[in-house]
Image (cartoon, grey):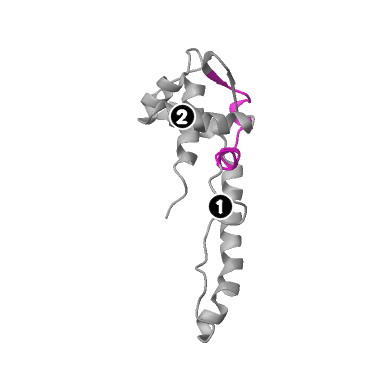
Amino acid sequence: MSISSRFSVGIHILALIAINKNERSTSEFLAGSVNTNPAVIRKIMGMLKTAGLVNVQPGIAGAELAKDLSAITLFDVYKAVNVVQEKELFSIHDNPNPECPVGKNIQSTIEPLFITAQSAMERVLNSLTLEDVVKDINDKENIC
């Protein structure tokens, strides 16, 4: 399994809104870039709005960033789109055989390792901003 694609789509939406700041970023426009249905975009936009990352107005097409690019971390997006519950990125299988020495101890052995790995990933996401993403895209496209 992998992290929900809502995470990458959320980053995509925010980056496109930033790069397209002088035009209207409607759900149809965003959906065309993501290559998905506008309803998917509206659902994720609702999550981003609830998290305070975008501003949208009912009945008015388009969205804008609610914060500066440098103030939005990838961890903010990760949390906003409900990728996983806290400390639950990795699942541990249920009901291992308690008669087996590995089965009896595997959960208590690997759970702290998984928590450490998730915390490390979250620290990295917290150190990266939407500004980093947009700068990389602009560099690749030679956009000033």
**Disc 2 element:** helix
Q: How far from the left and from the top, in percent, is residue 109?
A: 58, 74
Mark carried by residue 42: none
Q: Is residue 68 magenta?
A: yes
Q: Residue beneath label 1, please?
A: 121
Q: Residue beneath label 2, please?
A: 41
Q: How far from the left and from the top, in percent, is residue 20?
A: 47, 18
Q: Which quadrant of the rendered structure holds the N terminus? A: bottom left
**Residues drawn in magenta:** 63-81
Q: Nearer the viewer, residue 21 or 105?
A: 105
Q: How far from the left and from the top, in percent, is residue 51?
A: 63, 33
Q: How far from the left and from the top, in percent, is residue 120?
A: 59, 55
On screen, residue 42 above or below 117: above
Q: Residue, x 35% and y 30% (percent of image)? A: 35
Q: Residue, x 57% and y 79% (percent of image)? A: 105
Dividing the picture into quadrants, the one containing residue 104 is: bottom right
Q: Is residue 56 magenta?
A: no
Of marks 1 and 2, the one in the foreground: 2
